[in-house]
Amino acid sequence: MKWTAISEYIQEFIREKVSEAGAKGVVIGLSGGVDSTVTAHLAVKALSPERVYGLILPEKGITSQRDIEDARMVAESLKIQYREINIGDILECYKHSLEIYDPKNKLPTGNLKARIRMTVLYYHANSMNRLVAGTGNKTELMVGYFTKYGDGGVDILPLGGLYKTDVYGLAEHLGVPDRIIRKTPTAGLWPGQTDEEEMGITYRELDSILKEIESGDDIYRISKITGFSLDMVEKVFKMVEESSHKRLLPPSAEIPDDLKEER
């Protein structure tokens, strides 16, 4: 791929969206992973370090020390202002307020953590007149691997047109450290959680299938082209279909004209 041209295209996208919104810059959640690191690099190139603000939002006892250190390294190497906030303190308030709260119930608990991070990002963005720059990529968007109104709650998605495997290529082009590029992808929502294990498929496999789905091929042809089993291809199709609600505005009950007429 033409990484220089792609990098410049995304930088112009960031500048345009920030300008259109009349915003002073962007706020980015820094996880120490490749997606947030690439997003931060592009934002700094597009806007300057002074207009990019980083938030490191770990949960004590859950987020690895390495991820925290990598996030700090990214912010400091890019010379952007950043703040570190432990979301565990906020989560404790929910624990005491929600009678049904159960930490063993991983999905709602993980989604709650993502939504807490979203509110912290938006509080800072609103206070600073900035946009929240999301770090999600095309792969995650297509299969719904994000929390609705959590990490999916953002103003712009600079990496939204790049598959996960492409993000790695852009990361190398931008000079992102190998220790971040080679790190196992994880949302860090519970101990030992990894993206690929949770989805039951590798990003390489997923991207190969998603690219064929995007081209309009059916399950059988995709299986033949990629060499993956029909079951695997069907699984990805199902992931795309069942997550469609995450990519759309909530359905609205439009009132028919005949019901609006007065009798």
Image: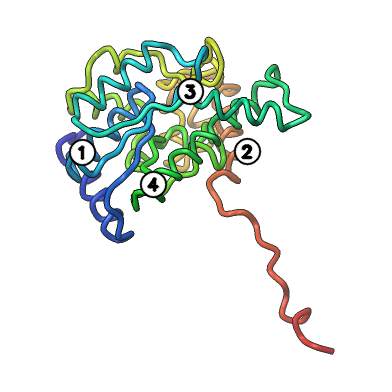
Looking at the image, how many numbered discs can be counted on the residues?
Answer: 4
Circle on res. 125: 4
Q: What residue is at 22 percent from the left and 25 percent from the top?
A: 76
- Alpha carbons under labels 3 and 2: distance apart: 20 Å
* Furthest residue in direction bottom, as rendered: 263
What residue lies at 51% left-to-right and 41% top-to-bottom?
119
The kind of residue tagged 4 is: Ala
Tag 2, which secondary structure? helix
Is 168 left or right of 95, judged from the image as shown? left
Which of disc 2 and disc 4 is earlier in sequence? 4
Name the mark nearer the viewer: 3 or 2. 3
Query: Amino acid type of disc 1?
Result: Val
- Between residues 254 and 85, which one lies in front from this camera angle? 85
In the picture of the structure, the residue carrying the numbered disc 3 is 187
Tag 1 near tag 3, CB within 8 Å = no
Looking at the image, is mark 4 or mark 3 nearer the viewer? Answer: 4
Which secondary structure, mark 4? Answer: helix
Circle 1 packing at 10 Å, graded few (<14), some (14-19), many (20+), is: many
235 or 255: nearer the eye?
255
| Residue that badge 2 annotates | 242
Using the image, tell me which numbered label, if any, was put on residue 44: 1
Give the image location of residue 149, x and y in percent. Answer: 55, 42
Disc number lying in front (1 or 4): 4
Q: Amino acid at mark 3?
A: Ala
